[in-house]
Amino acid sequence: MSAQAVNQETNSQMISLSSVLSRPLILSSYRRFQLMRFSVEEINNSTSLLPNISLGYDIFDHCSDTYNFPGIFKLLSFDGMIQPWSKEPKNVSKVIAVVGPFTSTQALTIAPLFMMDLIPMVLAELKKSNFTLLNQSVAFDENGDPNYGSYSIVFWNQNGDAEEIGFYHFRPTFHFINNSQIQWYTEEKPV
């Protein structure tokens, strides 16, 4: 690479960094961060909420596709290394779930990386969804709970196949889960 190309690349990175640093702070996002931080701290300091369990979090910038990947790779790595797909998993990330990002484009970009290790990604904006599927309305209230309609409860197998194990209807008396169809996986074998 020529010195001019290196200089141009460095300048574009500096411009990119300065534009990121000059963005305004979004107060609602900052409040969500503080709420999450406080909740994790309360759970970790409580002996009754989740005894013998410690929660953690890692926050990274996912405002564009190019900013998504360094943070994602850090989450998925163990001692700076990412386990190849063809190998038997040994040293894997301790991440068990991901909340966010806010837009479909960002979610579609990073979701396949989490799916390879069966790490679920929950979108915070799900509660704002409201659509019709097969002539049935699908919507969620301000808490993210379904306010009408019925929903299938799906179990994702380790091979990536989905199996319907029950259903949920917005009225509490109309729900069912077939627990015998659920398999919990440990490091050694299914339980």
Image (cartoon, rainbow, N blue to C red):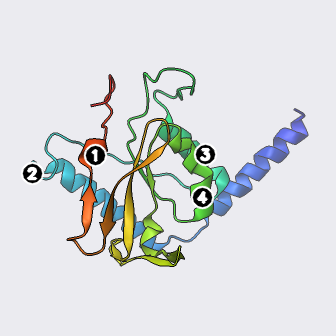
User: Which residue is nearer to you in this view: 8 or 66?
Assistant: 66
In the depicted structure, whether residue 88 falls above or below residue 11:
above
Side of 75 where 19 appears, left or right: right
Kind of residue indicated by mark 2? Ser
Side of 161 where 176 appears, left or right: left
Tell me how many marks there are. 4
Task: Pinpoint residue 59: horizontal percent, then vertical percent.
Answer: 45, 52
**Labels 1 and 3: the sequence-earlier one:** 1
Which residue of the protein is positioned furthest toward the left in this rendering? 48
**Labels 4 and 1: the sequence-earlier one:** 1
Q: What is the number of the mark on residue 69?
A: 3
Does dot 4 land on a helix, a strand or a loop? helix
Kind of residue indicated by mark 1? Leu
- CA distance for labels 1 and 2: 14 Å
Side of 143 where 23 appears, left or right: right
Residue carrying label 1: 55
In the depicted structure, whether residue 34 falls above or below residue 119:
below
- CA distance for labels 2 and 3: 37 Å
Q: What is the number of the mark on residue 48?
A: 2
Kind of residue indicated by mark 4? Gln
For label 4, count other residues whose C-alpha is less than 10 Å away and answer few (under 14), some (14-19) or many (20+): some
Residue carrying label 4: 106
Does dot 1 land on a helix, a strand or a loop? loop
For label 3, count other residues whose C-alpha is less than 10 Å away and answer few (under 14), some (14-19) or many (20+): some
Task: Pinpoint residue 120: horizontal percent, then vertical percent.
Answer: 44, 48
